[in-house]
Image (cartoon, rainbow, N blue to C red):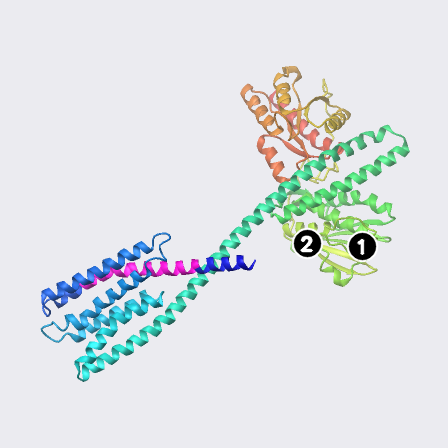
Amino acid sequence: MPDKRATAQQHSDDGFAEAREHLRLRRSLFHMLLSLPFALVICWGLKSLVPGRVLLDWLALKTLAVLLRIAIERWRLMPGHWRRGVRANHAAEAFDGLTWSALGFGVAAAARSDIDMETIAVVVGAGAVGNVVLSGSFASHAIFLGTLLLPTAAWQLARGGDIPLATGVCLLLLFVLLLRDGHTASRAAAELLRLRQRLDHLLDERSRALALAEERSAVKSRFLATMSHEMRTPLHGMLGNAQLLRGAVLPEGRERLATLERAGEHLLGLINDVLDLSRIEAGQLAVQRAPFDLAALLRDVTDLARPAAAAKGLALELDSRLPTPDWRLGDVARIRQVLLNLVGNATKFTEHGRVLLRARTTADGGVAFEVADTGIGIPAEQIARIFDAFHQLDSSLQRRHDGAGLGLAISRELVQAMGGDLACTSEPGRGTSFRFRLALTAVAALAGTDGVGGTGTGTGTGATDTHADATPAPRRPRVLHADDNPVNAAVATAMLASLGYDVCAVEDGAEALDRFRAAPPDARFDLVLLDWHMPVMDGLEATRHMRDHERHHGWPRVPIVAVTANAYESDREASLLAGMDAHLAKPFGLTELRALLEPLLERANSRARSRA
């Protein structure tokens, strides 16, 4: 481990040194390219004061120094060459510094008049530029300044006289000042470069961590989707058979079947909770806004929860001062889910007394909800944690209440997604109250609906009896059903038959497509139910081919329903995108099946009558 750390540190130091050297070389190259025009301007300015031969010799030396530095620095900028040619680079920098210094002790000496101040000004200017350009490397900085200023200073001191002496001393002091300033600038530049490299490293680590987290999240989502599908499939067979057998066994057998159904429904609830939590963590929780009757929803929730409360001897009361009906705009399925979670939780932790569901209109037109109980209560130190996923008040082996500890966490996230917040107050031994408020906009009543919405939890409250006043059909509706799982196929066939449908069952999408195309005009299918995952051809592909066949031959559109264990919102969207009319997630019961199919069949019949 120490060797690995030392190697990593060595790589880091090498990377820093290379980046610093490349930065200095690139800045130096730009300076070199500008120095030649600058030298030409100087020669033009001195042409009347200095012999032309001297100026041409100096310009040739300067050009040679510049070309030499450019060649070496460009070569060192090539990949893998930055370590090489350091001494040659320093020698070229020294040669360049001496050519500038030659203005002060060579060109000026050959002048026909005193041009010391002009040449010294040029030397000082070159030193100031070099102080900035070469600050990335103290060695290069010191070599260039030394060869630039020290020869000129020595020549001035050797001339004698007050002015040359003062000039020489000033040049020496300037050399010391620029050298110290260059050292400070070199350290500052190195620190800035290290900070930039550290920031780049942190950003790179963050990008890799984000990519890894996204990959793990995708793997987790795929795993949950797969496990959900694999668990829902046998659950559908188990619960469906239990429901179908309920009317065919003796009373003691019905009780056992009811126990089996409750166990399966409990397992299904856990699966749904885990999927909801996964959607929330992935930021994929979708909130729908549609008109619904809030008063009807509250009655629906209490009707659903009352049997469990009655079994424990509890009173479940609804205290609502809302008008009937009370049409609002919101996500009816999510509100129902939250209220059922809260009422179910209150029932579970209450041994005697009552559970109260209260709803009030707020001053700003929203709705305030409260679920209160007379149960065991929650200790003050636990209230802050009850909304944490998987947290339970009693997690011991002897705990009396089942559950995975997800209901409250999911409920709070759902309420927040709808623009509210879920709060709790409690007193141990006296009871608990959960409250939240939602800005549910009041809307005009809609005709022809029951008010609870079409995205329910399978209670059947959204179904309408389409056979009460309908003219008896000349034949039973024909249903084409495709499912490769024999247990689920048998369950669905039995359910459809019990609802009065004539069922044609096949095992894959290709066979379903063949049956669909081959149906004679007087015996075409009225409904099609397709599983997603099937051999030969899946349900989505079969749907696309069926829709193409309808368009090509001018057939009326037949309702197609996805009947699958894929239960994500994205799965439902994929079904609709493929051309299906609805998505029914397994497991489901007779009530859910009837509530979904009857409106679809009625709409199809209405379209047929309007065309006739």
Above or below: residue 478 compared with residue 227: above
State which mark lies toward you, 1 or 2. 1
Q: Toward the viewer: 565 or 145? A: 145
Q: Which mark is drawn over residue 396?
A: 1
| Image quarter hosting the C terminus | top right
Query: What residue did someone put label 2 on?
Result: 437
Above or below: residue 226 compared with residue 401: above
Residue 512 x/y as whole percent = 64, 22
150 lies left or right of 206 = left
Q: Toward the viewer: 534 or 130? A: 130
Q: Which mark is drawn over residue 47?
A: none
Residue 505 x/y as whole percent = 70, 22
Q: Main secondary structure of the magenta part?
A: helix
Q: Is there any visible trace of residue 358 in the rendered image?
A: yes
Please state the extent of the stretch shown in magenta in the rendering.
14-40
SS of the residue under disc 2: strand
For the point 10% across and 75% down, which residue is it?
113
Q: Residues within 10 Å of mark 1 (few under 14, many from 20)?
A: few
Q: Is there any visible trace of residue 442 in the rendered image?
A: no
Kind of residue sitting beneath label 1: Ser
Residue 387 x/y as whole percent = 71, 55
Kind of residue sitting beneath label 2: Arg
Q: Toward the viewer: 441 or 549? A: 549
Q: CA distance from mark 1 to mark 2?
A: 34 Å
Above or below: residue 121 compared with residue 271: below
Q: Quadrant of residue 474?
A: top right
For the point 48% across and 57% down, which residue is it?
201
